[in-house]
Image (tube, helix red, strand yellow):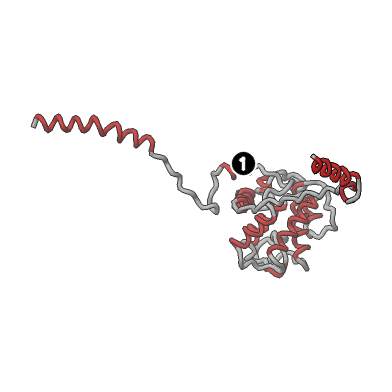
Amino acid sequence: MKYAVKLFLLLAVIFLPICGAAAKEKPIVAQPSSPSVQKATPALEKSSDMTIMGAAVANEQQAVTFIKKYAPDAKLNCSIEEIVRLYYKEAAFEGIRPDIALSQALLETGFFRYGGDVKAWQNNFCGLGSVGGGAKGATFSTPELGVRAHIQHLLVYSSKQRPKTTIVDPRYEMASKLPHIYGVCKTWRDLDGRWAAKGVPYGERVLNVHWRMLQIDPGPKSVEKPAEQPASPEAKDDKGPVREKVDKILKENKKK
């Protein structure tokens, strides 16, 4: 019995420090959460004060890939590539962030699947004039005009600068007469209680769609081919001074 106790104590002295060290070194692996429900992430918190006006963060390739991944059955009167191109063109022209404006359109249309009062054939990408109760809202003859109206409506909320293009937003003039709306929204969160009903974290929802877009691989950066330097006129002429010097050196080497 005495020997058994000694053996137990000896084993305890040997193995307990090893187990303790292993427990300290064991890493804690965080389980990834779904981007669609992620809220308290550094990336999203960092973009919480993202301004409405400014340059794009995601490029066009990211936006196209994002829509094709989550909405391959998008109901559009043009290709996915074309709708992305239109947003980047129209928004950039007015100084609005194209990628987040597109994210707002995705939120408003259910990723271009619609299903509410507004229908795909209307080219109404932000619910303009759709106030519920079956009201279909505005209709635009082409996707380009629908995108332009959306960007102009964002502009009336974020700036007192009038659109550079002919106004096609049917609610622009009305909104420009409302002091609590006209030019007061500097960030996407400022749209809370203005673009959407009070109590709805509207700006956060738009930014969450944008955050998911940013998770898409932006693709390889385009590398511009350096312009070819024009060759020296002397080098182009086989009988010029350069060639004569080379021939002279070769002859001298042969003599040596």
Residue 140 found in image quarter: bottom right
Quarter placement of the N terminus: top left
Q: Residue at x 63, y 44 (%)?
A: 47
Say if 69 sits above or below 244 in the image.
below
In the image, 63 versus 38, the foreground residue is 63
- Report x, y in % for residue 79: 70, 66
In the image, 117 versus 66, the foreground residue is 66
- Residue at the front extreme, as displayed: 255
Q: Amino acid at mark 1?
A: Lys
Q: Residue at x 51, y 52 (%)?
A: 34
Is residue 198 among what the camera can see? no
Left or right for 6, reference 195: left
Is residue 138 among what the camera can see? yes
- Report x, y in % for residue 83: 71, 62
Residue 60 found in image quarter: bottom right
Say if 71 sits above or below 198 in the image.
below
In the image, 210 versus 198, the foreground residue is 210
Q: Residue at x 68, y 60 (%)?
A: 131
Q: How many marks?
A: 1
Left or right for 169, reference 239: left
Callout 1 secondary element: helix
Say if 23 sits above or below 193 in the image.
above
Quarter placement of the C terminus: top right
- Report x, y in % for residue 155: 77, 51
Q: Which residue is mark 1?
A: 46
Left or right for 4, reference 136: left
- Report x, y in % for residue 238: 88, 51
The crowd level at tag 1 (other Cα within 10 Å; few <14, some 14-19, many 20+) is few
Q: Residue at x 63, y 43 (%)?
A: 48
